[in-house]
Amino acid sequence: MPYYRWNFADDNEAEAMFIDWLESGINIISFSFGKGIIVLFEDGSWGWTGVTKHLDNKLRGRQRSLPRPLYVATDTANRYFIQFADGECKWKASRSFSRAVNYSASTVVNVAFAPRNGWYIVFKDGSSAWNHLPRKLHQLLKKRKKNSVEVKNISISHSGDWFVSYKNGTYDFQLPELCNEAFNTLIHECSPKIDHVWLGKHGAFCIVYDIPTKYSSLSAWDICFSQDSIESHFTTKESVWKVISDLEKNILDCTTFNPIDVVRKENQWISLNNRRLFVFQNAGVNNIPVRVIEQIPKDIKPYRSVQVLPCKCESCGFGEFSTRYSEKQDKENDDTWARSWAWNLFLKEENPPSALLLTNSFILPSTRRFKSKLSTTKLKSKKSCNKREIDSRISLGNITNLYGQTSGQEKTVGQGKTLGQEMSYTSAFLDTSK
C-alpha cells in the first residue's frame, strides 16, 4: 500500500486537492504534473487542477458508461497522452512521437515529456523509444539498453531533471534540490521501496513508496489513540455516530474497512487511525484487523481517551436521545453532539469495558445534577439518567474504502520551508485530523 511524500512548489490549490483525493481512500492508478496536476482513480473517476484544453475536452462530461481512463501523462505546454480501458489512446505531441506510437506493435505503458519537444515511451513488451532527451539521460539510457536493463517508469521535469526506475528494482536520478533532500531523508528514515518519483515545474515533486509492514489482529481495547481529539465526521462527511449505528445494526462490519495502522512504542499499541478506532470501540467490535508499521513516527504519544469535537448537524444526534441543535440551549447542557452507544452500554453493563472507566474517558455532563462520580458501581437509577449522555472522549482516526482516510503530513524543513509531506491513502504516519 503506497505512501506519498511531496512538495508542490507553493501550488496551494493542487496540494489541497491532492490531500482531498488521498483522504477519499480511493487508489490512485495514474498521476501527472503539467499545468497543474491530474489524477486517475481505480474506481474510474478522475480529477485535475489544470490541464490543456484538448485534454479537458476529452474528460469533462465523459459518460461513465464509456471505457475508463487508465493512464495519463501531461506537460507544462499543451502535450498529453491518455489511454483508456479498451486500448484506445489519445494524444497531442510531435510527429516523431506519433510515429513511435503508431509503428509499435506493443501497448504504451509509460510516457514522459521532456524539454525542447523531447519525449520517452515505454512499451508493454519491454521496448522503448525516445527523442531529444537531456544529454546525460540519453547516454545513460543507451548504456542501460545495451545491457538489457528494461525501464519500468520514467519522469522528466520541464527543467531537465529526471528519475528512472528499472524492472530489476534499481533506479537512476538527477533530482531538483528539495526533491533530492527529501529523497535522501526518506531513505535514511525507513529504507522504503521507491516505486516512482513524479517531477513538475519549479522543483515540484511527488514520491510514491512503500514501507515494510505486517498484518495482525488486536483487541480494540488494547490500542491507544495518537490524538486527544477528533472531528465528528469522516472526510466523506459521514458522522462517526452514524457509522457506529451501522456497525451495531450489522449494516457494516470491521471487514468493510482497511486495517488500522498501529505502532508499538514502550509496550503500548498506538493507532494512527483514530476515528476508525473510536467507531470500533463504541460499537463493541473487539478483534479488529491491524497493520503494524515498523517505523515509529517521531513524537507520537499514546492517549487512552479523546474528545469528539462538537457538531451541529442532525446526523450527530444519536438514537432515541437525538434532538435538534438549538443556539438557545444553555452551553452547559449542550451535549447532544456527544451522544454515543457507550452510554447505553454503561447503563446495561454491571462491569462496563475498562476503557469506559479510565480517567477523563467519560464525564457526566452536569455534576450538579448527578452528584456522583464515574466508578465501577452501577448507577442506582437508570430512569433518572436516561435523558443524559456521557461526553465521549475516545477518538477514531482515518477510515478507508467507504468512508475515506486521512493521513499524516511531515514538514521537515524549518523557517516556513516545506521539504516534503508524507501521506498514505490507506494509512498515515501521523493523523493530523482534529
Image: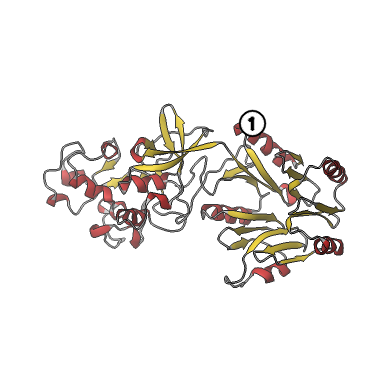
Q: Is residue 419 visible in the rendered structure shown here?
A: no
| Foreground residue among 254 and 150 | 150
Rendered position, 30 above or below 208? below
Please report the residue visible at 57 percent of the width from the left and 70 percent of the height from the top: 64
- Residue 317: horizontal and vertical position, in percent? 30, 58
Question: Under tag 1, what secondary structure?
Answer: helix
Mark 1, residue position: 188
- Residue 29: horizontal and vertical position, in percent? 62, 55
| Foreground residue among 103 and 245 | 103
Please report the residue visible at 57 percent of the width from the left and 58 percent of the height from the top: 42
**Quadrant of image for the N terminus:** top right
Instruction: Determine the image quadrant of residue 318.
Output: bottom left
| Foreground residue among 104 and 385 | 104
Left or right side of 230 for 330: left
- Residue 279: horizontal and vertical position, in percent? 36, 48
Rendered position, 228 above or below 316? above
- Residue 364: horizontal and vertical position, in percent? 23, 45
Left or right side of 117 for 3: left
Please report the residue visible at 59 percent of the width from the left and 54 percent of the height from the top: 28
Color theme of the render = secondary structure
Q: Is residue 108 visible in the rendered structure shown here?
A: yes
Residue neighbourhood size for the residue with mark 1, other residues' Cα within 10 Å, grouped as few (<14), some (14–19), many (≥20): few
